[in-house]
Amino acid sequence: MKTTLFILSMMIIGGSAIFSSCQQRTKKDLTKEPLIPVPASVTATNSSFVLDEGAMIYFDESSKDLKAVAEQLAILLRPATGYKLEVVPATAAPSEGIYLTTGAGEGDEGYELTITEDLVTISGAAPAGVFYGVQTLRQLLPPSIEASSVQQGPWEIATGTIKDSPEYNYRGMMLDVARHFFGVDDVKRLIDLLAIYKINHLHLHLSDDQGWRIEIKSWPKLTAHGGKLEVGGTEGGFYTQEQYKDIVKYAADRFITIVPEIDMPGHTNAALASYAELNCDNKARELYTGTKVGFSTLCTDKEVVYKFIDDVVREISEMTPGPYFHIGGDESHVTPMEDYIPFIERAQDIVAKYGKKVIGWDEIAHAGLKPNTIVQYWAKAENAIRGIEKGAKVLISPATKTYLDMQYDSTTHLGLHWAAYVEVDSAYMWDPATLEKGITKDDIIGVESALWTETITNMEELEYMVFPRLVGHAEIGWSPAGKRNWDEYKVRLSKQAPRFKALGIDYYKSKLVPWIE
């Protein structure tokens, strides 16, 4: 009798882990889950795993980086479930729970996600792959998992196996913080949202005519004066170096690389207003709060200009562990080509001096290009092709498809339409490898969306213009072309609506998408 009571009491203490193995499983088809980006391979076993109160998250203790990924997963899951979800090191796969390990998957970002009735295993070739497997697992859970307070379960996940890896190594978004400034908390929220859809680069446009947004200790007036205002004359702002470092680390913890951009020799009025010596006439310009482009230029004949660029590149590069430094180079309409070309070539040398690879808008292809330079195609395919002929790779950002500041249609209350109206279907229905004759997949490092902020003043407006178009761009960058189809995608996208709502995203409800509220 005592033995029987002891066994019963242990079953009760063991709790949900024992009961979960006995309970009836819901039949769920993994191939029907509305995952974005769509994975390369999905195999279903038509049952379900139940995340219960006694579950633990295990990580392979031989990989120290996995502990951080496991803790992020626990932090994600705890608010909505109300579960403790202890994070535990392991020397081998457990019999139940969630287990993060390495050893499977293609490249640094590939992963395999195996779900049985008792155990979820995420294995990546590297920690980045495990992280992306976690993002897929996140989408397999009900959308209410994104809530910040306890929600009603059950927390069921379809069983089967997903094998996945990206088509392109660079999947990015550019945020213009110069026209309107966005603070650290806003940038961190954007980083969190990008990570869900496997975006791995955030390009920050840190300077323009309207404002200089990054502290440069050797040239302090850039922010003290040049960072004061923004479009419309409202108060601007800037990141201190400590704040910038914080953003860089926050992004890196989510496997996102920060790409800093200092636009040059045009789009430089904020600098020209801060330091008179950067102008050919040695007269400081007035601060500018309009939206015209192409009227400003550094004085390319003066050595002090190159001292300025060297100091700026040095200070930012020291704070940026990623491989890239963006030099802009676009719309420098008042810089004669005979001055523009040697300037761009010298700017590349300065960036290389500090161990970074240059990215520049497609106009830089008029100059000689260093072997590792990347041309960002936004306007003219012939420029990108010229860059390819000079040995450069291409980052694809066609304004007619990826510019998130373009209006969805003529009734959109935000944005512009000088490039095109970009509805959700137009943003999705294209392939980087076939978009332009003369630019093949082998020439392309990846895809980047861009949000210029002439008309975007706050986070709510930002999210409205970014979502859901960025989600489609994320799939273009990650998923095989043969897996992408608008009619099928719009159904998957429609099922993201409850997740957007749980995340508090103010998204555009396109009439082309059969949204499920």
Image (cartoon, rainbow, N blue to C red):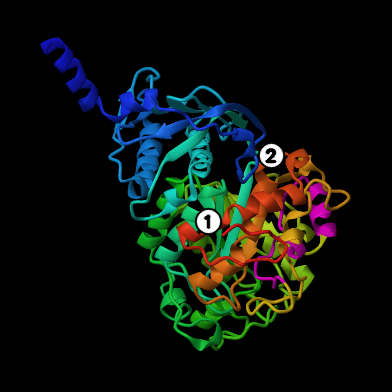
Instruction: Say if 274 sits above or below 166 in the image.
Output: below
Q: Nearer the viewer, residue 426 or 404?
A: 426
| Residue linked to disc 1 | 498
| Residue linked to disc 2 | 167
Crowding around mark 2 (Cα neighbors within 10 Å: few <14, some 14 to 19, many 20+) is: some
**Residue 362 at least partly seen:** no
Name the kind of residue labelled 1 in the image. Pro
- Residue furthest right in the image: 437
Q: Earlier in the sequence, mark 1 or mark 2?
A: 2
Badge 1 element: helix
Question: Horizontal and vertical percent for residue 365?
Answer: 77, 57
Instruction: Say if 23 sits above or below 172 in the image.
Output: above
Instruction: Say if 253 sits above or below 332 in the image.
Output: above
Q: Nearer the viewer, residue 174 or 158?
A: 158
Q: Quadrant of the N terminus?
A: top left
Q: Nearer the viewer, residue 122 or 331?
A: 122
Which span is picked out in magenta?
381-408
Q: Quadrant of the C terminus?
A: bottom right
